[in-house]
Image (cartoon, rainbow, N blue to C red):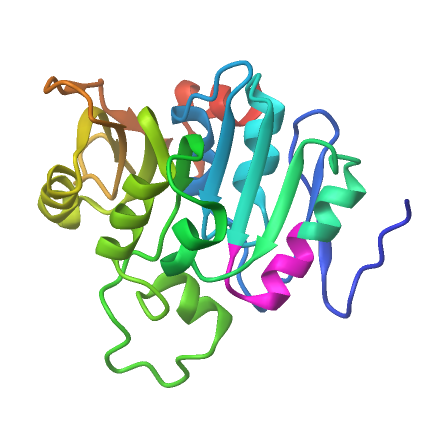
Amino acid sequence: MEVELREDERLDDLGRNGYRIIQHPKKFCFGMDAVLLSNFAKVEEGEVALDLGTGTGILPILLEAKTKGDHFIGLEIQDESADMAKRSVMYNHLEDKIHIVTGDMTEASDIFGLSTFDVVTSNPPYMIGGHGLTNPNDAKMIARHEISMTLEDLVRETAKLLKPKGRCYFVHRPFRLVEIMSLMHQYKIEPKRMQLVYPYVDKEPNMVLIEGVRGGNPRLTVEKPLIVYESKNVYTKEIREIYYN
C-alpha cells in the first residue's frame, strides 16, 4: 500500500528490517531515549504490549523488530501524531502486528480494560506541569511537559492495565527517580531492574531506565551504567550495538 506523506513530513530509516517511520521535524521526532527503552524492554513470545503516549509509533515499531512479542498497541492523544504512527505501520506492512489507538492515556484502563497486557512501556513527558509555557497546545510541549497527564496518571493506569506479574518499562529523568519509585510502590508495582544512562563517563546521568513487575517480590537489580559518548559526536561501543545490531 502506498502511503502519502503530508507537507514537511519525512521518512526516516530505522535501521531495522528495512523499517521506516514518518516524522515531522517541526513537530516532535523521537530521540535516543525511545531507542534505549526499546533495547531495555523485554517482550516475550506470545505476549501483548501496550505503549502509552506512543507519539509517532516508534516504540511499537522497534519492539516488533527487536522482540518476539505477539502484538503491539500504541495509545496516543494527539491526532496528528497518531495519524503519522498509523501511516508508518501501513508503510511497513505491520497492520497484523501493530495497532495504533487515538485516546487519552489517563483513560487507558477504560479503553482497554483491566489486567489486559503482559507488558506496558512508556517514554512519558519528563517535565512537571505546563507552568510558563507559551503554547500548551504545541505538539512538542505536550510531548515534553505533563500537560495532558502526570507521572501518577502513568503509574496508576499501568498498574490497572498489567496482568498480575506483568512488566512495565519506563524511561525518565533521574531527578524524578524517588517520585517514580514511590508511585510504583503505591500502586503495587515492584521496581525490579534499573539502569542509569550517562552522556559521558565524567558527567551526571541524564536518563534512567526502569523495569517494574505488578505484584512482584522486592529485589532491585541495578545494571552497569550505560555511557553514550566516548568523545564529542562519537558513540560508545554499547550505543553503536543498540542502534545498529
Q: Residue furthest right?
A: 2
217 or 236, which is in the foreground? 217
In the picture, the quarter occupied by the C terminus is top right
From the top left corner, tell me how far across and down residue 113 is, in percent.
44, 45
* Relative to 22, residue 96 above or below: above
From the top left corner, tell me how far across and down residue 133 is, in percent.
32, 81
Asked whether the viewer can see residue 17, the reply is yes
Callout count: 0
Q: Residue furthest top?
A: 45
Asked whether the viewer can see residue 232, the reply is no
> Which residue does the image show at 45% across and 53% down from the upper left?
53
In the rendered structure, the answer to whether residue 34 lies left or right of residue 197 reads: right
Q: Quadrant of residue 188?
A: top left
> Which residue does the image show at 34% across and 71% down from the upper left?
147
From the top left corner, tell me how far across and down residue 193 is, in percent.
23, 22
In the picture, the quarter occupied by the N terminus is top right
Residue numbers of the magenta segment? 76-85
> Which residue does the image show at 47% across and 21% down from the upper left?
43
Q: Is residue 216 magenta?
A: no
* Relative to 143, residue 38 above or below: above
From the top left corner, tell me how far across and down residue 122 is, in percent.
39, 43
199 or 25, which is in the foreground? 25
240 or 131, which is in the foreground? 131
Q: Main secondary structure of the magenta part?
A: helix
63 or 134, which is in the foreground? 63
> Which residue does the image show at 22% across and 18% down from the upper left?
224
In the rendered structure, the answer to whether residue 195 lies left or right of residue 86 reads: left
